[in-house]
Image: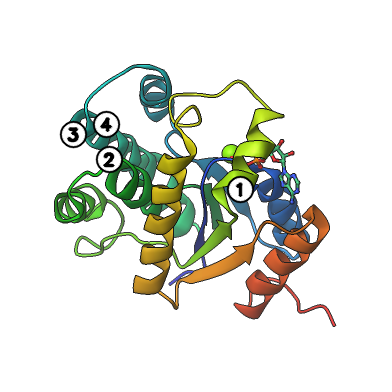
Amino acid sequence: MTNGAFITFEGIDGAGKSSHIDALAQALRAAGHTVTLTREPGGTPLAEKLREMLLHDSMDALTEALLVFAARRDHLRCVIEPALARGEVVLCDRFTDATFAYQGAGRGFDLEVLSYMERLAQTGVGLQPDLMRSPDLTLWFDVPPEVAAQRLSAARAPDRFESQPVEFFTRVARGYADRAAGAPQRFARIDSSQPREQVAAQLRAVVAARGWLAQTP
Ligand SMILES: Nc1ncnc2c1ncn2[C@@H]1O[C@H](COP(=O)(O)OP(=O)(O)O)[C@@H](O)[C@H]1O
Ligand SMILES: [Mg+2]
């Protein structure tokens, strides 16, 4: 058996996920782990092509969900499962919780159908045929949608999701809260409305509490 860990970063656009993932990877490497840093949708040549379509081409909710899971399966097969099998720590910027939050709560797509698609796409990819891959830890960057929108407006040109109105992100944020309530052991809430240094410290403390980094006094 290996001691790999699958850690996902979740939260609405503008929450601060990408701002912290590199530093956490560095801290984990300094602690002796081999780290694979990746993102969704994307992470493989095929999945990155699907990402471009998802972020820029208009499509209906079912097409969107199918493409998200197609990208995820390829990513699991080619990157995530092999890295976990080698005993690495995988840090992934978004994973299936984002599908439930965005396509489910945000777009209104049927959650039971998403659960079925999750089982279909994420089972039997790795060494254990019966295992449906799910993260070991999910770092949930929680921030009021208005704060996230303000950060984004100053940061970059919006994609198909980022250009949605604040009400969309209110629904997505509620979707994340529901996911967290349904898996309290796996989710760690990070208050990402705080200044960056405090967010980073909270992040390190959560990962240290799970045994992947040394505890700092
Ligand atoms: N704690 C913070 N306080 C203020 N601004 C932040 C904070 N964290 C990130 N930002 C800024 O907010 C914007 C969105 O951050 P980003 O990490 O890209 O979010 P995400 O990856 O969750 O969409 C960036 O311009 C970033 O510099
Ligand atoms: Mg990001």
Which label's residue is closer to the chain start, 2 or 4? 4
Which label's residue is closer to the chain start, 3 or 2? 3
Q: Which numbered marker is on residue 69?
A: 2
Is residue 88 visible to us here? Answer: no
Q: Give neighbour class at mark 1: few <14, some 14-19, many 20+ (Cα, 10 Å).
A: many
| Helix, strand or loop status at disc 3 | helix
| Helix, strand or loop status at disc 4 | helix
Residue indicated by mark 3: 62
Horizontal relation, residue 22 to residue 73: left or right? right
Q: How far apart are marks 1 and 4 (CA)?
A: 22 Å
Colour scheme shown: rainbow
- Marks 1, 2: nearer the viewer: 1
Image quarter for ligand 2: top right
Residue type for callout 1: Ala
Which label's residue is closer to the chain start, 3 or 1? 1
Which label's residue is closer to the chain start, 1 or 4? 1
Residue type for callout 2: Phe
Horizontal relation, residue 178 to residue 43: left or right? left
Q: Which numbered marker is on residue 64?
A: 4
